[in-house]
Amino acid sequence: MEIFITGSGTISSIGNNVAESIKSLRDQQTGIKLGAFQALPNYRVGAVPFSNAELMEKFNLTTEGSRTALLGMIAAKEAFAGHSIDPTIRTGLISGTSVGGMDMSEKEYKNFLEGTNHNPLNYRHHASGTSSEEISNELKISDFINTISTACSSAANALMMGARMIQQGMLDRVVVGGTDGLSSFTISGFKSLMIFDDEWCRPFDESRKGLNLGEGAGFLVLESEKSLVISKQTPLAKLTGWSNASDAFHQTASSPNGYGATLSMQEALNVAGLQPSDIDYINAHGTATPNNDLSESHAIKSIFKDNIPPFSSTKAYTGHTLAASGGIEAVFAIEAIRQGLLYPNLNFSTPIEETGLTPQLKFESGKTIKHVLSNSFGFGGNNSTVILSAL
């Protein structure tokens, strides 16, 4: 059974929608800035430059929620625009998040400590699942709602779950993706792990020291052929391959040899019925941490041998948006296919000594891109790969 993609939406530090985001990628314009997160002004992050109240007003949102939920509503509404709720189409929403409503909890806890304006009711937004419920309420989707929290592979796993539910006849149409808002807890946590770079991150570079965090959301609409007949939507692309594989190497780090990532990519190719030579571009996980980029480089070499397709990480534009990254990068992959684009890997100068790989270094358009492989790797070796394909 084919899985069609009939909508996409995103918001991040490089754009409020798909068109703005692709323009930033074309212009090689990063959204990562020093002081963009007011609570911790000495860090470089990719922040969406609006307060929660401004997000609600600017994007005409009717449902109150955490920053994670609001960003998710914006991207999901863009993806679902032009679709309508139809009782004959079983429609679900599967959203990935790792931060949940942390921003509201932090604010209320500060109010509690200071003894001013403390409202315990706002803690109700804290749970990860609450953000999914708030997004579904904004879209008026009620047939099925689920939340996935597998760290940085969450959105990719949401895509997989949606595809499987369609294949198994449980749903006809699913809005899938991920969303995460910046919080002091997250930034401080990555800093404590010593994988947060004080400078601009440098994916796949020998001098890489760590990541820059970001916030945002990315969602797709998946539909079955049955749903297409009723909805009469025009597909953008297809979701043809997916896989999740764990190397169970370490609580946070990937295996040095990229074993789990290799398994994930190979199985995704198997699901899609493709050979490595069929892949025209890889949107790599590429966090710019010493461990991840070396591990992923080994895995890419294991799969593609001496015929490695163009690859790059777009996290030097958006920052690492955690659970949202797989959704945002799936949107970028779809536009790479539709517009024939290759995105350059920013801030690269020297290949990693152990692998010697050089990513895509210049923006190119007019390419023939039929299949894009997109990696999303989470803590604990939760490695996920999806393959997006032309119609």
Image: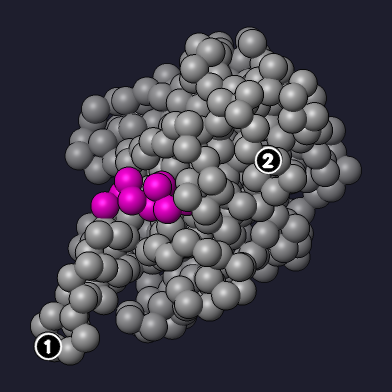
Which quarter of the rendered picture does the C terminus lie within? top right
The residue under the point 41% across, 47% down is 132
**Callout 2: SS:** loop
Q: Identify residue type, mark 2.
A: Ser
Chain part drawn in magenta: 127-135
* Left or right: 152 in relation to 50: left
The residue under the point 26% across, 52% down is 127
Are there few (<14), some (14-19), or many (20+) residues within 10 Å of tag 1?
A: few
- Give the camera-side residue of 226 and 289: 226
- Alpha carbon of mark 2 to alpha carbon of mark 1: how far? 46 Å
The residue under the point 32% across, 46% down is 129
Residue 368 visible (yes or no)? yes
State the residue position of label 2. 84
When asked about the image quadrant of residue 383, the answer is top left
When asked about the image quadrant of residue 107, the answer is bottom left
Q: Earlier in the sequence, mark 2 or mark 1?
A: 2
Q: Identify residue type, mark 1.
A: Gly
When asked about the image quadrant of residue 292, the answer is top left
Q: Estimate the x, y position of residue 211 in percent, counting from the top left.
A: 41, 59
Q: Estimate the x, y position of residue 48 in percent, counting from the top left.
A: 53, 70
* Left or right: 264 in relation to 26: left
- Give the camera-side residue of 78 and 186: 78
State the residue position of label 1. 115
Q: Estimate the x, y position of residue 61 in percent, counting from the top left.
A: 55, 65
Q: Estimate the x, y position of residue 184 in percent, counting from the top left.
A: 28, 71
Which quarter of the rendered picture does the N terminus lie within? top right
- Please, is residue 249 above or below residue 67 in the view? above
Q: Residue furthest front?
A: 87
* Left or right: 337 in relation to 311: right
The residue under the point 39% across, 83% down is 38
